Amino acid sequence: MTNTFKAFLVTESDSGFDHSIVERKTEELPAGDVVIDVEYSSLNYKDALSASGNRGVTRKYPHVPGIDAAGTVVSSTDSHYKPGDAVIVTGYDLGMNTSGGFAGRIRVPANWVVYRPDNLSAENAMAFGTAGFTAAMSVDTLLQVGISPEQGPVLVTGATGGVGIIAVWLLHNLGFTVVASTGKTGHEELLKAAGASSVVQRETLLENANRPMNKPQWAAAVDTVGGAVLGNLLKSIQYGGSVACCGMVAGNDLNTSVFPFILRGVNLLGVDSVELPLDVKQDIWNMIGKQWLFPNFGEFKQKTTQTIGLEQLPEAIAQVLKGQHTGRYLVKI
């Protein structure tokens, strides 16, 4: 195998944190069981934080971010994987404190690696990435507690983000009436193209915040924003409804009361896509590739996903940090 590969390297200097495309060697990679040639990655908010020097995400620099990677096994000391296997790595410590997917090669523990379903290309796998995987987990969590289309509309908050917009698309294709909420303006057409029946501004969800309970509106919700939105949203869930909570872009505090839970039997369901057991992660990826790669995915991807190379990452990272991007950045290595 070729010993060198390109990588997007973040270094620390007196003036801050700098980005550059460098040539690296396989022996520079951290210890691990499986060496993978990366074909595609994706840009997530956590990657943008790592690339800007956030010590809560990445402790030491120089560092290669990228919490997602899809590619092919080059070598493995673990018998579960062999050269040529098509694989996916998302979550765990990849791209945080372990050299990540913004590079032509990674080396990781075997218990981070899942097989890529046969009909799911590396490109489409990373069009989902951690964001789409989290969306799929959130939707599946609601299905597992019995939420069904005939019960009423499902709300998706933070719907222009990567998790939110894929959740809208998945729910629509599963037959749900989806209402999309966003804090941004001018994206109604995009959200309706993704499958939303209507769009509401985030401020609407904060109305009547002083009331102990509000009129029941939603059979369920996928909440990607947290904070005050989640606290007020719980008051508007129908009897026996559920909220899948998977994000905190609006804050990590939750101010609520017991009323939604003891008066309407509302379920607040936590979703973690990072540290879940590998067999569960494999099951979700299999479901995405074999059941949820709906025929309109190509059209959806074209409207919501922008493909960039390593060279375009600095500009894309800046857009993500400013909250100015919608949908997904797919990174072709």
Image (tube, rainbow, N blue to C red):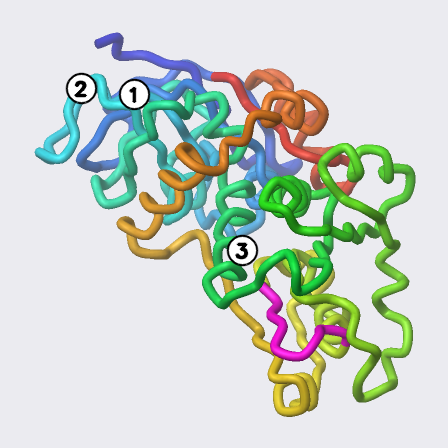
What amino acid is found at the position of numbered circle 3 in the picture? Ser
Marks 1 and 3 sit apart, C-alpha to C-alpha, by: 28 Å
SS at mark 3 in the image: helix
Q: Is residue 298 above or below residue 237?
A: above
Q: Residue at x 63, y 72 (%)?
A: 241
Q: Position of residue 328 (x, y in %)?
A: 64, 32
Q: Earlier along the polypeptide chain: callout 2 or callout 1?
A: 1
Q: Is residue 100 visible?
A: no
Q: Which residue is mark 3?
A: 138
Other-residue count near label 3 (Cα within 10 Å), few / some / many at <14 / 14–19 / ≥20 = many
176 and 246: which is toward the camera: 176
Q: Which residue is mark 2?
A: 83
What amino acid is found at the position of numbered circle 1 in the picture? Thr
Residue 51: in magenta span = no
**What is the quadrant of the N terminus in the image?**
top left
Q: Is residue 284 left or right of residue 48?
A: left
> On the image, which quarter does residue 106 sit in?
top left
165 and 130: which is toward the camera: 165
Residue 242: in magenta span = yes
